[in-house]
Image (cartoon, helix red, strand yellow):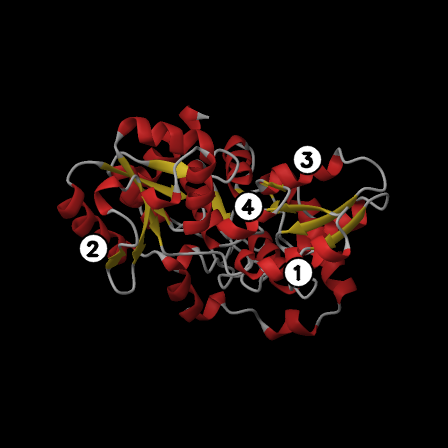
Amino acid sequence: MSAIDALLREESLLPETYKQMTDRELIERISFVKNSLGRDLYLPGHHYQKDDIIRFADDTGDSLQLAKLSAANREAGFVVFCGVHFMAETADILTDPDQQVILPDMRAGCSMADMADYDQTERAWEALTHRFGNTIIPLTYVNSTAAIKAFVGRHGGTCVTSSNARRIVTWALEQKKRILFLPDQHLGRNTAYDLGIPLDEMLVWDPISDVLEESVKTDECRVILWKGHCSVHENFRMPHIENLRKTEPDRRILVHPECTWEVVQASDDAGSTSYIIEQIEKAPGESKWAIGTEMNLVNRLIQSNPHLDIVSLNPFMCPCLTMNRIDLPHLAWSLDRIDAGKPVNVVRVPDQIAEDARKALDRMLELV
């Protein structure tokens, strides 16, 4: 069942009762049911979630890390994934068939993952292989749907995270002359450039117009970038960096590689969410930082590191709207329904899609 189908089902809609409860009542209810379910419940929370949700998490991490932790937990019959839909799909693919993965709010999604659907990818593959022959291997960022992971798995490719992208892209270019990188063009471009591939050996595929944007010599192309992006990380822009360089030249700028190539090049450092956290945790006291990533995480780093001077690279940045759908009412409701023996918002990836998607995930896990 897709997220859209789930939203159309009456039992997937939050009952009015939970909307009328106070935060205190919700917190008490969640705590009670969580304790009652004990080891039969595993509750992973993504780094980008709100603090009032993270407080209940058994583990926090990035999407793949949490999916792996979910798969390693064989005791829990229920995995209540506090993240977004593609993360819950990945957890379902990697967990046992008798475990149920639940997403408290089916509206929780990722705009980047939605920028590549299966039909678009099939059309792109047909056009690109007609143009370049059997010289392309597909890669997909884990921020993608199970259907895209399955497509990549069937065609001999694998998944990528922001922390292992260098290793995976290096491997892929040892397999074929070219890669097709879905769905985030910026992570693909930044990784390839970091590996020494010049920009004039990269092309962009536009899935809306089904056109290869031929801004360079096509025959020399080694990287084909899907025209997708993270709407949060694209909001860190050059004027933000230029302003800081003028007003606070001693403030170190650290960004996520989902930012544009220009922003990454102009920053002092770039890396995955885990890398950003590690750099802050080992930073010298009273050092000054501007961080370019999701605002909930930036705020959490500010609160947990009072000895540092940390700001967001974009002072007007808001938390990601789609990443922040999980709230106390939805979490309380989903736990109550588990406790009542009638779970809602169970994420189930169809068997064939799950089988092919697992090929892509397993290849990645074998490589790293």
Residue picked out by circle 2? 123
At label 4, counting other C-alpha atoms closer than 10 Å, the crowd grade (few under 14, some 14-19, many 20 or more) is few
Q: Residue at x 56, y 33 (%)?
A: 75
At label 1, counting other C-alpha atoms closer than 10 Å, the crowd grade (few under 14, some 14-19, many 20 or more) is some
For marks 2 and 1 on the same chain, the one whose residue lies earlier in the sequence: 2
Secondary structure beneath disc 1? loop
Cα separation, mark 4 vs mark 3, equals 20 Å
Q: Residue at x 30, y 54 (%)?
A: 215
Secondary structure beneath disc 4? helix
Residue picked out by circle 4? 265
For marks 3 and 1 on the same chain, the one whose residue lies earlier in the sequence: 3
**Displayed quadrant of residue 16:** bottom right
Say which of marks 4 and 3 sits in front: 4
Q: Is residue 4 above or below residue 335?
A: below
For marks 1 and 4 on the same chain, the one whose residue lies earlier in the sequence: 4
Front residue of this view, candidates 103 and 289: 289
Could you tell me if residue 310 is visible in this image?
yes
Cα separation, mark 3 vs mark 1, equals 21 Å
Residue picked out by circle 1? 314
Cα separation, mark 4 vs mark 2, equals 33 Å
How many callouts does the rendering have?
4
Work out which quarter of the rendered image holds the N terminus and state it.
bottom left
Residue picked out by circle 3? 278
The disc label shown at residue 8, or none: none
* Three-letter amino acid code of the residue under disc 3: Glu
Secondary structure beneath disc 3? helix
